[in-house]
Amino acid sequence: MANDMELIGNWNYPTAIRFGAGRISELPDACRVLGMERPLLVTDPGLAGLPMIANAIADCRSAGLGCDLFADVQGNPVAANVDAGVGAYRAGDHDGVIAFGGGSALDVGKAVALMVGQTRPIWDFEDREDWFTRVNVDGMAPVVAVPTTSGTGSEVGRASVITDERDHTKKIIFHPRMLPALVIADPELTLGLPPNITAAVGMDALSHNLEAFCSPFYHPLAQGVALEGMRLVKEWLPLACQQGGSVTARAHMMAASTMGASAFQKGLGAMHAMSHPCGAVLNTHHGLTNAVVMPYVLVFNRSAIDERMTALARYLDLPQPSFQAVLDWVLALRKEIGIPADLAALGVTDDHIGQLAEMAAVDPSAGSNPIPLTVENLTALFQNAVHGRIG
């Protein structure tokens, strides 16, 4: 077993990552490397009052950087959050963004860095066809990403998920240059996460790796990353929930999160297609929703992934390797870390199913599910997930 001293490194997959405990001290240097003199630190209200944010700003200012704070970010961010961030960026004459926090803060930070140099509305850069070519690349600001949870992996993503309040849909805003140029992945920043949030974001990391692994598209690099990412979750998520002060467990989960987001360029699937509309309509926690629907989606996809799940079970060293072994492991893990059994526990009712199924069918994640998704089969999937019918 690796000791804590070995859990440190400088990686370049898919971007420059400074990984290891205590490396948040390198934030001023990271800003300097990207040419920032007046960074805007974007985070959420929950983090804004914590010492880690105050310390980060103080360190930047002590290094001569004109660092200011923006924290008008909600759990499922909307365009108004991005607009407000752009306003703060321009008002402070900033020259770069520190995206600091969980997935919502990271997504808003990246979107602010995109939009500060654009004249079109944000929806013109949705991940459709070649819409990313509309971006004025010269106007984009550099980004240092600092994750404080281990789930979304947004620090290594080329997109932001923003809710369009006009139709209550989550839309993916994309440009290759939205990938942060530098990441500081310091697992000590996650030590304060309570067990329920650790569980939810950890299952989000698992869902990214698992759906990427199941995606039918050809990408052997992502396939290998996803496989090891799932092993790290198996070995370390329960400990991270039970012993939140374990830097070793936190470090491995932070790596698993980054791996999941690196792998899902291969595709996602029904877990995310179902989770996105739940978050947009009912404001459910994204990672928690993925965790709840996970076994239902696995059973739905079984005919297309049976052989692959057997291989996964072998890699995870599960007894009697098979699809059933993976399903049993997922169910046991959910129970151990306190994940609800069904969507009803998250406030989803039969009355929501029609709207959610229609939204899930056109979600960007739907196209890479191993079995083609329709309104009809998604309706059945939601019904099973609401009423706890796994199969």
Image (cartoon, rainbow, N blue to C red):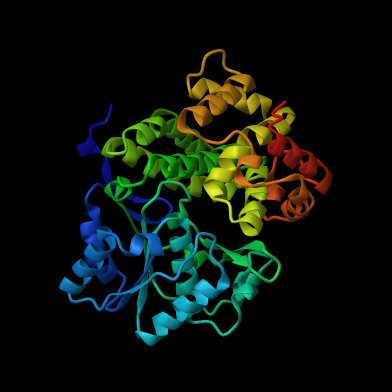
Q: Is residue 181 left or right of residue 294?
A: left
Q: Is residue 41 left or right of residue 312?
A: left
From this view, report whether residue 211 is shown above or below residue 17.
above
Give the number of marks.
0
Residue drawn at x 44%, y 41% is: 196
Q: Nearer the viewer, residue 103 or 179?
A: 103
Q: Nearer the viewer, residue 43 or 266?
A: 43
Which part of the image, by quadrant, shows the C terminus?
Answer: top right
Q: Is residue 111 visible?
A: yes
The image shows residue 116 at horizontal and vertical percentages of 47, 80
Q: Quadrant of residue 327?
A: top right
Which part of the image, by quadrant, shows the N terminus?
Answer: top left
Residue drawn at x 28%, y 36% is: 248
Residue drawn at x 63%, y 32% is: 295
From this view, report whether residue 283 is shown above or below residue 372.
below
Q: Quadrant of residue 68?
A: bottom left
In the rendered image, the residue lying farthest to the left is: 62
Q: Nearer the viewer, residue 387 or 391?
A: 387
Residue drawn at x 50%, y 36% is: 224
From this view, report whether residue 125 is shown above or below residue 365.
below
The image shows residue 47 at horizontal and vertical percentages of 35, 60
In the rendered image, the residue lying farthest to the top is: 320
Q: Nearer the viewer, residue 265 or 109?
A: 109
From this view, report whether residue 332 is shown above or below residue 281.
above
Q: Is residue 226 left or right of residue 57?
A: right
The image shows residue 60 at horizontal and vertical percentages of 22, 70
